[in-house]
């Protein structure tokens, strides 16, 4: 584009009124929240931990059932 | 996944080991394990079956450990590996470049919100994303550290406090899952003579991976690897790399560095380079890590994982310009890279190009990612790209898929949409619902406060703002709103304090500075 190598002169108005308005201060809202997508590894870890929690609960329930069965503590 | 059809009579003619191997290749690990189990019951000294069983168990429970760099609460508070206690900006992950220092290259906090660690919200979470706090002030606050350990979608309670604790727990989880789904008994490693195995590298490698990836006992694996590397007369890169991995998991970072360097000296591999860089990241030396990545990308020019790691690091350093450039390069080479697509989508959404973000999200959806997060993002992108009918459907679907961890966030975004279309009743209800699910959702408190203010309930609004800024000191909005309300009520001292709080969270916030200027005029008048 600039084959001649010379930049055109910048034309700026020297006269005239410049308007600027200060906005009054107002409350701001929090921005919409983009949710990060989980990586496969994170999803897998969460699944493993969930499975572990489920198995632990099963074990506990089974243990409780056996202690209530009458044998008491082993 | 189970086999589709039960074993046919003619299958019995197949050599059972070949059958197991074929199952392994087709990723049907449970079937493979069952077959190996029966082979081992017939002949407990069947080495081929033993190796295959090790491999199958490892593959079933394999986690990409370049991704699993989890810093627990105790790790964050009692960190003593970090070299510099007061690093210069840009040389540490704890003091990344702020957007002001980069002369406007980073996203402004007024447009892109920040997470609790003080970084702009990212488009993709890995287990390590929210690792380090960014300021010493935040480091001191145990409550902040507690809040940070709660990642989206996971329960904060019961999380192990150290990374070693997490490893142990993962080991237990995989043991438990193997015990329940009929995969057969595990391999007893206590009685194994490592010295004998070290002479058979094929078996020893399978056993070493089994120890690292399934039992998660790096100390035992270290013993085996040390024996084996001696047997291999210190010339096998693989053993040195595994030694480094074990040292890293045990927290002996300098030893790990030595092993990785030596392994690269034998034979430079991508994975070893990435692991070496990870050691530097753990030591909080991002520039050293960048150097490793640079060298690796010169050596392996077409490799995506190096580029992605570099992009991640730049993102952690708040240099979003460079990280976005790298992510674009990744997408050009690999158009289905979920991480790059998600990060680019987030970048475009917060740089006022929701249409482009929408296209990236659609590509993710076409790839088969279907999660609350993605539907929520699609809904937001649709809404801001003026496709209102689709936005509601997407957010609806996000709610259908959501569990308790994220549904508060989805309701919060529905509230935002309500504000956008002017349905303040809807948004009021949505924010209330978000708070009923997660009472600590600071953004909902803030926006509810603004709505209360419009209704004229000043006291309730103030309460909501102060609650929000206590819950999330990294947000500038509640502090600024609170300051403004106090200013209007004539409580200048309170307004001054709150405006300073807002500036602490977001040093470049113009309105807070303006408010302080007006307050100073008032103070001078007295």
Image: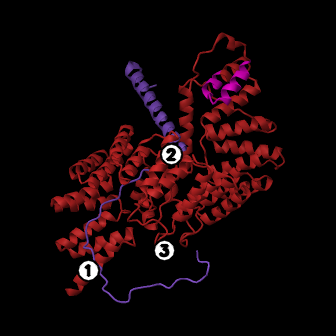
Chain colours: A purple, B red
Residue in front for this viewpoint, A8 or B19: A8
Give the CA distance from mark 1 to mark 3: 26 Å
On the picture, is B429 further left or further right than A12?
left
- Which badge, 2 or 1, is on the more N-terminal residue? 2
> Which residue position is annotated with label 2?
B363
The kind of secondary structure element at disc 2 is helix
Side of B51 relative to B311 (left or right): right
Q: Which mark is residue B103?
A: 3
Q: CA distance from mark 3 to mark 2?
A: 33 Å
In x, y percent, where is residue A54?
45, 32
Residue A36 can be seen, yes or no: no
Q: Secondary structure at mark 1?
A: helix
Kindly identify which numbered label has been placed on residue B189: none
Which residue is identified by label 1? B518
Q: Which residues are magenta?
A: B15-34
The subunit carrying tag 1 is: B
Instruction: Looking at the image, tell me whether mark 3 or mark 2 is earlier in sequence order.
Output: 3
């Amino acid at each position: 584009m600039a084959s001649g190598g010379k930049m055109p002169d910048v034309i700026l108005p020297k006269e005239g009124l410049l308007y600027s308005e200060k906005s009054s201060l107002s409350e701001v809202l929090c921005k919409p929240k983009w949710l990060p997508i989980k990586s496969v590894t994170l999803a897998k870890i969460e699944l493993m931990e969930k499975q572990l929690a489920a198995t632990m609960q099963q074990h506990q329930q089974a243990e409780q059932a056996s202690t209530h069965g009458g044998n008491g503590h082993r | 996944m189970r086999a589709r059809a039960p074993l046919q009579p003619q299958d019995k003619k197949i050599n059972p080991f070949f059958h197991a191997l074929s199952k392994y290749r087709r990723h049907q690990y449970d079937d493979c394990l069952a077959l190996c189990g029966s082979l081992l019951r017939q002949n407990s000294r069947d080495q081929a079956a033993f190796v295959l069983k090790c491999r199958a168990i490892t593959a079933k429970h394999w986690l990409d450990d370049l991704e699993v760099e989890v810093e627990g609460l105790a790790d964050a508070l009692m960190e003593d590996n970090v070299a510099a206690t007061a690093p210069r900006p840009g040389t540490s992950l704890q003091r990344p470049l702020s957007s002001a220092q980069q002369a406007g290259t980073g996203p402004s906090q007024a447009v892109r919100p920040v997470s609790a660690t003080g970084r702009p919200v990212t488009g993709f979470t890995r287990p390590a994303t929210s690792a380090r706090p960014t300021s010493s002030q935040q480091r001191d606050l145990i409550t902040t550290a507690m809040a940070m350990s709660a990642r989206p979608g996971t329960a904060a309670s019961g999380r192990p406090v150290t990374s070693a604790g997490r490893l142990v727990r993962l080991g237990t989880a995989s043991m438990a899952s193997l015990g329940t789904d009929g995969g057969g008994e595990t391999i007893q490693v206590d009685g194994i003579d490592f010295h004998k195995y070290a002479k058979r590298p094929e078996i020893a490698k399978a056993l070493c991976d089994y120890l690292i990836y399934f039992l998660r006992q790096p100390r035992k694996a270290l013993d085996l690897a040390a024996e084996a590397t001696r047997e291999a007369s210190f010339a096998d890169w693989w053993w040195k790399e595994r030694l480094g991995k074990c040292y890293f998991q045990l927290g002996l970072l300098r030893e790990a560095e030595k092993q990785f360097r030596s392994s690269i000296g034998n034979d430079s591999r991508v994975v070893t380079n990435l692991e070496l860089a990870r050691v530097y990241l753990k030591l909080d030396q991002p520039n050293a890590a960048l150097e490793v990545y640079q060298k690796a990308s010169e050596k392996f020019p077409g490799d995506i994982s190096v580029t992605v790691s570099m992009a991640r690091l730049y993102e952690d350093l708040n240099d979003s310009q460079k990280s976005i450039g790298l992510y674009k390069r990744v997408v050009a080479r690999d158009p289905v890279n979920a991480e790059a697509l998600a990060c680019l989508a987030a970048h475009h959404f917060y740089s006022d190009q929701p249409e482009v973000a929408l296209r990236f999200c659609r590509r993710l959806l076409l790839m088969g990612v279907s999660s609350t997060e993605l539907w929520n993002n699609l809904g937001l992108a649709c809404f801001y790209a003026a496709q209102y009918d689709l936005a509601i459907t997407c957010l609806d679907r996000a709610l259908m898929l959501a569990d308790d961890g994220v549904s508060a966030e989805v309701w919060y975004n529905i509230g935002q949409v309500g504000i956008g279309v002017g349905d303040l009743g809807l948004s009021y209800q949505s924010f209330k619902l978000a708070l009923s699910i997660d009472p600590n959702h600071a953004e909902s408190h803030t926006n509810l406060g603004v709505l209360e203010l419009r209704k004229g309930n000043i006291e309730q609004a103030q309460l909501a703002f102060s609650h929000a800024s206590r819950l999330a000191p990294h947000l500038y909005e509640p502090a600024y709103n609170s300051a403004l309300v106090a200013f209007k009520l004539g409580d200048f001292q309170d307004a001054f304090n709150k405006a300073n709080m807002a500036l602490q969270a977001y040093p470049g916030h113009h309105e807070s500075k303006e408010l302080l200027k007006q307050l100073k005029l008032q103070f001078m008048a007295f």
